[in-house]
């Protein structure tokens, strides 16, 4: 990795590189499987209850890294600040969302259980923190296993070039978050293999919800087209290109549309403006904070973004009325109803009828891994959540 | 030497004389083929390097031409920045196009171009930096005039595509290409193991060659590369942007064809040789068996002839004695007794000679023998015979003791045989000399006489069985062959030098023994 590692602690509010290792140290009660269904981790079993509530019973053998068993009190304490309500109920916990519009399972899958002991936050995952500095975190497996990864070092190099150079030299065994344009650089290196995982987010162009619904429908078709992808991305970069080339749609006459872009989306903004033709208005490439500010004030027509697409419940975080991450203030009662009911298909249909965005390009997760690792995979929920199960050959 | 070994040797000699010249000829031909192959591979690598260099040059020229066209079309208009941003969508390899004017802060100038060079572009001069590694791939900052004085359009050429092209060059299974900048830094590597050096900037084995090539010095066509392997290499250099392209292929792979052919040829030759030896050996053994059988019949015939002749001669004498005895004349009695005694002695010697032929040398019988004393013993043994012939036998000892190991009885039989032959060949009153000496690492017992000598045409067959010409008396022709047999069984030899009318010298040579102990040593095989 490159850049500051940040804090591994589950209480950290900043989005740190180190968070990639959280699943190995701090377990969640549940997570999502490849089909987007909830599955237990720290929970021994769970049951969905009416009113978007989930009843959870803890795994009996779960212990923290100091050997103490994981108790319901530890779980309740961990869930306290996550917008979830917890009630003890006959050998289990009944959990429900207290954030309007946010489903309980989506919140629950994001909450990591921990226990504070002697100023340290302990987890119940297979690894424990052995040492931590600003540039390196060392984790060791609590119960070493033959043929598995028993020690992990997260090393933050100064730049991507340093990180790649050290990986090519064999000093590091894994580079995550690789751009597809760099793949050729690692192909043909005998000590490394390239692995793919389905991307969880999609490069998109969000609409100002003040635009009429019919216009947004047309905009969604025009902007989520192969032409935009061809202009903004390389060949074969987007999952949508492989699935469907799309057709040509023309926009009705109207005033030019103001476009905001930021960070890595300049080409997407340029491509959108070109495809819009006469409707393509001023394109402003802004710093992220300014972009968010303009979005909140509604001073835009189109804005580039990368919303979560998977798991399906993530749409609740982005498109549900009143959601904290719903920056464009999208609101559609049919969508809300479908999300509240957990009917993701219905929600998708409703979103297509009244689109808040044009979903342009979903890119694979790419990583480079040492060839000695037999079964590496990315995802499906957390990028490296399966690392503890990877097998190592001699 | 056994019949099997003789057959094997014969077959090997015949096979080797047939196969080896052919093999040598083929190896010579393959060496020429190998040299031609190496030369051909180097030329091919050179051609690939040249093509790669041409592609690199064409690509960079194309990018810069595109930049010039964009700058001319969009750099001079009022909304040039916006137009440049739009057009960059169509030229992703030019990265972000920037309009640079006199008002542009120098911090916004291209990082790898000094301000005075960028300002030169304002005056209509196209300027470009050396290539450098931006993130992972090579890049080049270029500024071109923008169609209006005081303006330039600058771009950072992304040479990732070139890097990919170089990385994708494959020669055979293991050959690859490398690209270096003018300072010898690796900017693209087809070899995965060398790719870290692209990012780290660490020099590789070829870096010095690339730097030298950029200054016009020749590059070697064979070298040990950055992976530590011996490779054939083709090189090409580009004045602009100062890159060198090397295309390498491991020698092992490049010359695999010639090596495989050589291997197959060697294997084929070895197999042919072995088959020839095996088949030849089998035929030779059959042939030798037939020859031996024939030789046995001949030998039996010669023995029969000799025995018939000699015993017939003895029988004639005994008949004469019988007739003399039948006369019942007392006066003949002494003569009869003398004649019978002589014939008995003759027949005993006859039997003894044949008996010697049946005695084999045994390791247990080998004892240390001091040759001077041994010669003296022989002289005494032959003294009676010498007296009868009125010949003197002398011993000329070696200056010091001279030891050999052997079967004393057999060696004595051999020495006595040579001595008695010498006595027989000598005229009355003359002398026979037994000379002991050390010569060429061997202990020598030479028996010299001053007799009539041996005819030169007989010397070659003198030691063959039943070849004696003295077929009078008891000479059936087994004496000298027996001497030779005994000498060989002791690891020695026997030879003769003779001049008709001047006499002969028979020389018995035996290995010198440094040890005087009586422990047995292995005898040579009795022929």
Image: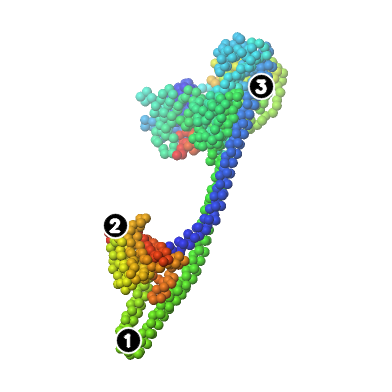
Residue behind mark 3 = B65
- The quadrant the N terminus of chain B occupies is bottom left
Q: Residue B399 carries which label?
A: 2
Q: Most extreme residue toward the front, as rendered?
A: B429
Q: Position of residue B177 (x, y in %)?
A: 57, 32
Q: Is mark 2 on a helix, strand or loop?
A: loop
Q: Where is residue B256 in the image (x, y as percent from the top left)?
A: 55, 43
Q: Which mark is residue B332?
A: 1
Give the mark nearest the N terminus, 3 or 1.
3
Q: Nearer the viewer, residue B497 or A121?
A: B497
Discs 3, 2 touching: Cβ within 8 Å: no
Discs 2, 1 touching: Cβ within 8 Å: no
Q: Which of A331 and B406 is in front in this view?
A: B406
Give the mark nearest the N terminus, 2 or 1.
1
Q: Which chain is disc 2 placed on?
A: B
Quadrant in the rendering for residue B122: top right
User: Which residue sits at x=32%, y=60%?
Assistant: B436
Q: Where is residue A298 in the image (x, y as percent from the top left)?
A: 60, 15
């Amino acid at each position: 990795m490159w850049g500051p590692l940040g804090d591994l602690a589950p209480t950290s509010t900043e989005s740190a590189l180190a968070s990639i290792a959280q699943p190995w140290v701090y377990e969640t009660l549940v997570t999502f499987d490849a089909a987007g269904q909830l599955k237990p981790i720290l929970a021994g079993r769970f049951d969905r209850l009416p009113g978007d509530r989930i009843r959870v019973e803890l795994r009996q053998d779960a212990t923290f890294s100091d050997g103490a068993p994981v108790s319901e009190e530890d779980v309740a304490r961990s869930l306290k600040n996550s917008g979830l309500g917890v009630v003890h109920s006959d050998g289990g916990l009944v959990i429900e969302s207290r954030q309007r519009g946010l489903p309980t399972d989506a919140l629950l899958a994001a909450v990591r259980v921990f226990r504070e002991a002697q100023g340290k936050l302990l987890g119940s995952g297979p690894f424990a923190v052995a040492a931590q500095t600003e540039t390196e975190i060392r984790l060791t497996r609590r119960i070493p296993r033959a043929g598995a990864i028993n020690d992990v070092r997260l090393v933050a190099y100064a730049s991507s070039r340093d990180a790649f150079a050290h990986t090519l030299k064999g000093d590091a065994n894994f580079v995550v978050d690789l751009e597809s344009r760099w793949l050729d650089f690692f192909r043909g290196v005998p000590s490394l293999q390239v692995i793919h995982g389905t991307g969880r987010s999609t490069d998109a162009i969000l609409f100002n919800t003040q635009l009429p619904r019919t216009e947004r429908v047309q905009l969604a078709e025009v902007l989520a087209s192969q032409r935009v992808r061809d202009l903004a991305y390389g060949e074969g970069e987007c999952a949508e290109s492989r699935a469907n080339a799309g057709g040509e749609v023309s926009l009705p006459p109207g005033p030019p549309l103001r476009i905001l872009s930021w960070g890595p989306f300049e080409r997407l903004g340029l491509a959108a403006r070109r495809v819009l033709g006469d409707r393509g208005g001023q394109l402003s490439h802004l710093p992220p904070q300014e972009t968010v500010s303009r979005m909140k004030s509604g001073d835009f027509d189109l804005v580039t973004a990368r919303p979560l697409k998977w798991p399906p419940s993530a749409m609740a975080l982005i498109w549900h009325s009143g959601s904290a991450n719903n920056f464009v203030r999208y609101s559609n009662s049919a969508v809300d109803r479908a999300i509240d009911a957990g009917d993701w298909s219905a929600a998708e249909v409703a979103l297509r009828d009244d689109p808040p965005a044009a979903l342009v390009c979903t890119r694979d997760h790419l990583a480079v891994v040492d060839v000695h690792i037999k079964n590496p995979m990315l995802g499906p929920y957390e990028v490296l959540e399966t690392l503890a199960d990877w097998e190592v050959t001699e | 030497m056994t019949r099997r070994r003789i057959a094997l040797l014969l077959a090997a000699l015949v096979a080797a004389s047939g196969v080896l010249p052919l093999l040598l000829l083929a190896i010579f031909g393959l060496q020429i083929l190998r040299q031609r192959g190496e030369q051909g591979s180097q030329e091919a690598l050179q051609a690939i390097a040249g093509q790669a260099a041409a592609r690199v040059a064409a690509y960079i020229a194309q990018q810069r031409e595109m930049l010039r066209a964009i700058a001319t079309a969009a750099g001079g208009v009022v909304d040039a920045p916006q137009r440049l941003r739009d057009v960059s969508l169509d030229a992703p390899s030019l990265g972000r196009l920037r309009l640079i004017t006199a008002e542009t802060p120098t911090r916004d100038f291209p990082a790898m171009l000094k301000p005075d060079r960028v300002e030169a572009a304002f005056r209509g001069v196209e300027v470009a930096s050396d290539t450098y590694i931006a993130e992972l791939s090579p890049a080049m900052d270029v500024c071109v005039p923008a169609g209006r004085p005081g303006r330039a359009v600058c771009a950072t050429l992304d040479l990732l595509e070139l890097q990919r092209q170089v990385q994708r060059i494959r020669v055979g299974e293991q050959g690859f290409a490398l690209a270096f900048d003018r300072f010898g830094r690796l900017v693209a590597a087809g070899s995965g193991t060398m790719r870290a050096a692209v990012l780290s900037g660490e020099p590789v084995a070829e870096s010095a060659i690339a730097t030298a090539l950029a200054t016009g010095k020749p590059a070697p066509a064979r070298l040990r590369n950055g992976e530590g392997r011996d490779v054939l290499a083709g090189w090409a250099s580009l004045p602009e942007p100062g890159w060198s392209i090397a295309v390498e292929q491991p020698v092992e792979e490049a010359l695999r064809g010639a090596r495989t052919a050589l291997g197959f040829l060697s294997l084929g030759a070895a197999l042919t040789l072995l088959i020839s030896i095996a088949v030849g050996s089998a035929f030779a053994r059959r042939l030798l068996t037939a020859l031996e059988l024939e030789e046995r019949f001949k030998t039996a015939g010669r023995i029969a002839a000799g025995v018939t002749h000699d015993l017939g001669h003895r029988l004639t004498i005994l008949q004469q004695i019988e007739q003399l005895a039948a006369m019942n004349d007392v006066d003949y009695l002494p003569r009869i007794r003398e004649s019978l005694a002589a014939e008995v002695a003759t027949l005993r010697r006859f039997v003894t000679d044949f008996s010697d032929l049946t005695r084999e040398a045994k390791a247990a019988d080998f004892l240390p023998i001091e040759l001077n004393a041994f010669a003296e013993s022989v002289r005494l043994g032959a003294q009676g015979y010498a007296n009868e012939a009125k010949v003197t036998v002398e011993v000329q000892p070696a200056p010091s003791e001279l030891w050999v190991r052997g079967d004393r009885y057999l060696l004595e039989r051999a020495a006595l045989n040579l001595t008695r032959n010498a006595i027989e060949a000598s005229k009355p009153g003359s002398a026979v000399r037994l000379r002991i000496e050390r010569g060429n690492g061997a202990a020598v017992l030479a028996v010299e006489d001053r007799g009539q000598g041996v005819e030169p045409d007989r010397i070659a067959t003198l030691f063959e069985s039943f070849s004696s010409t003295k077929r009078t008396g008891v000479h059936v022709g087994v004496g000298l062959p027996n001497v030779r047999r005994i000498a060989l069984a002791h690891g020695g030899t026997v030879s003769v030098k003779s001049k008709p009318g001047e006499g002969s010298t028979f020389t018995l040579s035996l290995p010198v023994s440094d040890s005087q102990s009586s422990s047995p040593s292995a005898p040579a095989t009795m022929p």
